[in-house]
Image (cartoon, rainbow, N blue to C red):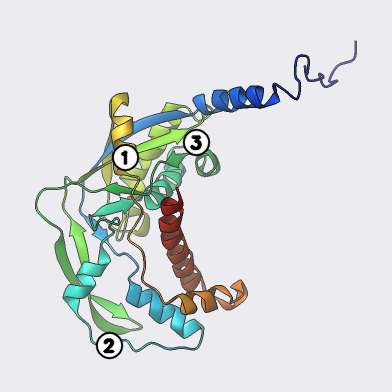
C-alpha cells in the first residue's frame, strides 16, 4: 500500500440541486468554530490621546500635492477638543483598530506563547469603536514640546485612571483562550494604547483585563458598532494625494493617508450595511 497518496474527496450525494444547501451548511459550521470572548479593559494609568486632526491631515496632504494650507493661529482649546478619539455620536471612544494593534504587539512579551503573525491573521476586535466610560470628564494636558528644535505648546486630552472600555475579541480555536489572554495581558502591561505608552518609553495607557460573562457579547457588539467620527477633508485634495505613487510619499504622510481612508471608508461601509 502506497503512503502519502492524497485521499479523494467524497463527492457522493452532491448534485447541482443540493450544492447550495451543502455549501450553506459548511459555511455555518465554519462560522460556529470562531470563538467570541467579551472582556473589560480597566486603565491603570491615564490615557493620553492624540488623534489626527482635520487641520493636520489637510496641511500634510496640501504640502504633498503642492497646495500649502496656512497654519493659522494656535488655539490650545481647539487642539484639546480635536485630540480625543470619538465615535459618530461625538462620544469618547477608542478605535478598535488601535486596541487590536496593541494586542498584536503584546505577543512580543509572551515568551513565544503566541506570535504577532497568528494574532494579526486570525484575531478580531469586533466593531469600530469601544466607548470609553469614566467618572468626570476628559482633562486638558498642556506641555512644552519640541517642534523641529523650537519649543512649542501642545494640548492633548487625557482620560483618567480607572477608565474602562468593553470589547469582544473573536478568534479561531487554533489560538486558544490562554494564548489570547496572554497577549492581551502583555499588551496592557508592556505596550499600552495612545501616546506616551510603555511601548514608546512612557507610562500612560496601561490596562488590566477581566473576562465578562458570555451574555454580554451582544451588548458590547452593539455598543462598538459605531464608526469613528469622519475626517472633513476636501475630496479633491484627498483624490490628488491618493494619486501620488508610494515612493513619493513619506512614512508619516502615508500613515495619515491610510488613517483618513480607513476612518472615512468605515463610515461609508457602515452606511451601506
Occupied quadrant, residue 249: bottom right
Residue 114 - label: 3
Residue 85 - label: none
Q: Position of residue 176 (x, y in %)?
A: 47, 27
Residue 155 at least partly seen: no
Q: CA distance from mark 3 to mark 2?
A: 48 Å
Q: Secondary structure at mark 2?
A: loop
Foreground disc of the pair 3, 2 = 2
Image quadrant for the N terminus? top right
Q: Nearer the viewer, residue 81 or 192?
A: 81
Q: Which residue is mark 1?
A: 222
Q: Position of residue 75 (x, y in %)?
A: 19, 80
Looking at this view, name the residue that lies furthest to the top.
1
Q: Residues within 10 Å of mark 2 (few under 14, many from 20)?
A: few
Q: Nearer the viewer, residue 160 or 67?
A: 67
Taking the spot 18% from the left edge, 76% from the top edge, the residue there is 76
Question: Which mark is first along the chain, 1 or 3?
Answer: 3
Q: Secondary structure at mark 1?
A: helix
Q: Position of residue 141 (x, y in %)?
A: 17, 67
Q: CA distance from mark 1 to mark 2?
A: 40 Å
Q: Is residue 211 above or below residue 197?
A: above
Q: CA distance from mark 3 to mark 1?
A: 29 Å
Q: Which residue is mark 2?
A: 72
Q: Is residue 11 above or below residue 252?
A: above
Looking at this view, name the residue that lies furthest to the left.
136
Q: Nearer the viewer, residue 34 or 254?
A: 34
Amino acid at each position: 500500500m502506497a503512503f502519502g497518496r492524497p485521499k479523494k474527496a467524497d463527492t457522493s450525494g452532491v448534485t447541482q440541486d443540493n450544492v447550495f444547501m451543502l455549501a450553506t451548511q459548511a459555511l455555518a459550521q465554519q462560522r460556529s468554530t470562531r470563538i467570541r470572548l467579551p472582556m473589560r479593559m480597566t486603565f491603570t494609568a491615564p490615557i493620553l490621546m492624540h488623534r489626527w486632526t482635520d487641520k493636520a491631515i489637510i496641511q500634510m496632504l496640501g504640502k504633498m500635492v503642492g497646495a500649502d494650507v496656512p497654519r493659522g493661529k494656535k488655539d490650545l482649546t481647539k487642539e484639546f477638543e480635536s485630540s480625543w478619539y470619538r465615535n459618530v455620536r461625538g462620544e469618547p471612544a477608542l478605535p478598535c483598530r488601535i486596541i487590536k494593534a496593541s494586542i498584536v504587539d503584546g505577543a512580543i512579551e509572551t515568551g513565544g506563547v503566541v506570535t504577532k503573525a497568528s494574532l494579526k491573521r486570525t484575531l478580531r476586535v469586533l466593531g469600530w469603536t469601544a466607548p470609553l466610560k469614566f467618572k468626570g470628564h476628559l482633562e486638558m494636558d498642556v506641555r512644552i514640546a519640541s517642534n523641529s528644535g523650537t519649543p512649542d505648546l501642545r494640548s492633548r486630552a487625557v482620560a483618567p485612571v480607572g477608565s474602562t472600555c468593553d470589547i469582544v475579541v473573536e478568534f479561531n480555536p487554533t489560538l486558544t483562550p490562554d494564548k489570547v489572554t496572554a497577549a492581551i495581558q502583555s499588551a496592557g502591561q508592556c505596550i499600552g494604547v495612545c501616546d506616551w505608552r510603555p511601548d514608546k518609553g512612557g507610562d500612560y495607557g496601561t490596562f488590566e483585563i477581566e473576562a465578562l460573562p458570555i451574555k454580554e457579547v451582544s451588548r458590547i457588539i452593539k455598543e462598538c458598532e459605531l464608526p469613528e467620527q469622519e475626517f472633513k477633508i476636501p475630496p479633491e485634495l484627498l483624490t490628488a494625494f491618493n494619486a501620488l505613487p508610494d515612493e513619493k510619499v513619506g512614512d508619516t504622510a502615508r500613515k495619515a493617508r491610510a488613517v483618513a481612508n480607513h476612518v472615512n471608508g468605515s463610515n461609508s461601509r457602515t452606511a451601506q450595511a
